[in-house]
Amino acid sequence: MTNDARLPEKAFPVSWDQFHRDCRALAWRLNGQGPFDAIVAITRGGLVPSAIVARELGVRIIDTISVVSYGEFKQLENLDVLKDIDQHLAARDPKSILIVDDLVDTGKTAQLVRQRLPGAHLATVYAKPMGRPQVDTYVTEVSQDTWIYFPWDLGYSFQPPIRGPGG
Ligand SMILES: O=P(O)(O)OC[C@H]1O[C@H](OP(=O)(O)OP(=O)(O)O)[C@H](O)[C@@H]1O
Ligand code: HPA
Ligand SMILES: [Mg+2]
């Protein structure tokens, strides 16, 4: 049990190095599919993985959709689309479009974007069981009661010894 009731049970902190490796692994998995000539990044979390996947797969067209779904560790009642997909992109062959996000949790964000681009391929780096049916390709699954901490949300801090200060 955590002391703070807002926090999920388990923590899965991800370093920049690990995130880069996991994004490369995602790109390897996507390489045999597609081909994709445009990426839709779900901001903000999808921006970094989109840049890495785009570099690996030679994709130069990147659009964004801005969906806000979480407050502090908790999903909001309604998802809010602050910026939608470009109409020119929506007119392309959906099979050539790759949607990228950092993770799926409940799957609500992915579901909303899928409804806007039916037939496009949706990829995330991490997936929790509830959201997995919304994802075509992902790298690592974590349990539903795990919170993933991304490198851009973390900083170095003192870690107390496991056995306490007395040793
Ligand atoms: O599967 P779901 O339960 O819908 O949750 C997944 C979404 O939640 C997070 O984004 P968030 O809305 O927190 O915004 P951010 O990407 O700007 O951090 C994450 O980046 C996914 O986009
Ligand atoms: O586990 C998570 N980590 C970071 N952001 C999130 N948004 C939904 N679930 C998560
Ligand atoms: Mg997000």
Image: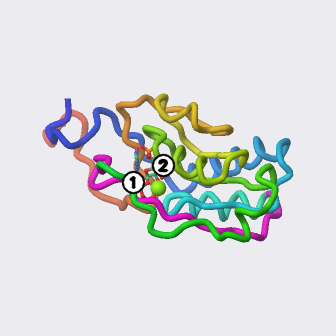
Question: Hey, which quadrant is residue 146 in on the image?
Answer: top left
Q: Position of residue 65 (x, y in %)?
A: 55, 64
Amino acid of disc 2: Thr
Q: Of 152 and 110, which appears nearest the observer?
A: 110
Q: Which mark is residue 89?
A: none
Amino acid of disc 1: Leu
- Residue beneath label 1, please? 79
Question: Secondary structure under badge 2?
Answer: helix
Residue labelled 2 has its Cβ within 8 Å of some atom of ligand 1: yes
Q: Residues within 10 Å of mark 1 (few under 14, many from 20)?
A: some
Q: Is residue 137 above or below residue 152?
A: above
What span is in magenta? 57-76
Q: Is residue 117 above or below residue 89?
A: above
In the image, taking residue 141 as reference, residue 22 lies left or right, namely right
- Residue beneath label 2, please? 109
* Residue found 45% across the figure and 62% down from its top: 81
Q: Residues within 10 Å of mark 2 (few under 14, many from 20)?
A: many
In the image, taking residue 43 as reference, residue 62 lies left or right, namely right
Q: Position of residue 149 (x, y in %)?
A: 40, 49
Q: Is residue 10 above or below residue 160?
A: above
In the image, taking residue 8 as reference, residue 123 lies left or right, namely right
**Alpha carbons under labels 1 and 2: distance apart:** 7 Å
Tell me, yes or no, whether the two marked residues, 1 and 2, touch with CB atoms within 8 Å: yes
* Residue found 59% across the figure and 48% down from its top: 115
Q: Position of residue 34 (x, y in %)?
A: 83, 48
